[in-house]
Amino acid sequence: MKTYLFVYLGSTILAAIITPLIIFIARRIGIVDVPDARKVHFKPIPRVGGIAIFISMMTLVIFVLFLDNTIGDKFRDIQLKVTALLSAAAFVFLIGLIDDIHAFSGKIKFLTLIIASLVICASGSRIDSISIATWFELDFGLVAWPLTILWIIGITVGVNFIDGLDGLAAGISAIACAVIAIFAFNSGQPLMVVIMLALLGSLSGFLFFNFNPAKIFMGDCGSMFLGFVLGSASVMCVAKTKTFVGLALLALALGLPIFDTFFTVLRRYLNRRRILHSDYGHVHHKLLDMGLNQRHVVIIMYVLTAIATGLGMFMMITRDAGTVAIFFCVLLLLVLLFRLIGIGQLQKIITRLKSNMAISHEGRMYIGIFEDAQLGIRKVTSFKDWWQAISTVAQKMDFLELSLTVTISDGSSRDFVWRKDGTEKDQQETVTVRIPIGKHRLALPLNIEAKISINSSLESAGQRMMLFGRLIDEYCSAGILTENLLSNC
């Protein structure tokens, strides 16, 4: 117990000493987070606080690992796994730090997490099987590697997403550290207790400067490092105990970030945004929109996490159905919470999904019409055939009207109009566009005016206009639009 106390207090004090130095250096060299439309702070704040978390945790862990005691002996028994965890975590931290200084693309950070997770798997720490109470054991076989990688990356991304308010990610991660430490202690894994207490102490010291109003942010080097260590540590615990409780406890402790990540990915997919592109729809943003201030939001999320975790801790003393029932009851409470604040409402998700599917189906249909038209329109040799061809395409693409006025060199003009049957009585919403014709041998500029039915959405009308415009641009032969041919029409 003295070693555990030494690790926690030592990392706390070290983080409290290092963090002000990081603040000073970051300000001097300009590594600060500048406010923008998506941020909730109003002045530049140093963003590399993860350095203090990393140094204080690693220093205490490495020091204790080489002590001549029980913990040191345990380290020598599983040296490869622990070395892999610490090395991979250091790699993730380094990439995050470089990203904080010179921004990387999301793809590079995602690739970093895959590589680091592969290192964890290769060391022998994998979710190979899980016992569901005493009922049965799930053996994942070949799925163990991708499942482990997905779990570690999911936890890391979740912590990174939740790092949007002062002290939020650090506080919730601290609760998760305490949960894993308790589980590791209960299951006879002293080395994992040391790692989690060192990380918990680092976060405790860092929170003195990160809680609202924050003097420093942890940055990607901190959030990625935190999430990766938590995800990997939980995998190591489960790999030894093979019990459902190990993963379930961390899932509840990080329930808010996990659900936030799930709904964020779903929301961006439904909105057809890039998955790794930031937005303003996270759970903490929703709470801010309700009129709460930063400090209140963070405290509420601390309390909710503590309640979910506290209820989840009963899984360590229950058996069989009781364990599973507690887990799913707490999950249900988290789902209801997200629904209450306007995230994850099933009806809205289904409506948006149906809309996207309809737009996608329409898009494929119109692309098919466009590709068929490409084959036919290239063969036309006269203006009459050309006009007939584009009018046919317009009808198939739900255009309501096409009109073309041609003014030739003698000042006379000709009007060509195609109109869908029944257009005069049709009260549909429409969009009217003018499409220039660039390839012709006439003296004056030429434009086709098209009236397009909106149908299900403006996006659909825009896609049809784009495809039709592309057809005009690519397959309007200069030989067709001449004064001689037009005079004979």
Image (spheres, grey):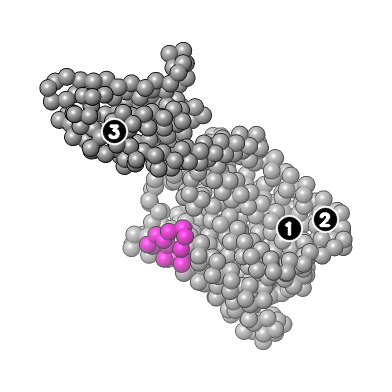
Q: Position of residue 235 (x, y in %)?
A: 68, 67
Please tell me whether mark 3 or mark 1 is closer to you in this view. Answer: 3
Q: Residues within 10 Å of mark 3 (few under 14, many from 20)?
A: some
**Extreme residue toward the top, this view:** 425
Which tag, 3 or 1, sits closer to the chain's start? 1
Q: Compute the Cα span from label 3 to label 2.
A: 78 Å
> Circle 1 sits on which residue?
248
457 vs 158: above or below:
above
Which tag, 1 or 2, sits closer to the chain's start? 1
129 vs 489: above or below:
below
Foreground residue among 400 and 481: 481
Q: Residue at x 54, y 39 (%)?
A: 361
> Circle 3 sits on which residue?
382
Q: Secondary structure at mark 2?
A: helix
Q: Compute the Cα span from label 3 to label 1.
A: 72 Å
Residue range in magenta is 95-108
**Could one spot residue 208 in this view of the protein?**
no
Magenta stretch mostly in which secondary structure?
helix
Task: Look at the numbered discs 1 and 2 and tell me whether their residues touch, using CB distance below 8 Å.
Answer: yes
**Could one spot residue 160 in this view of the protein?**
yes
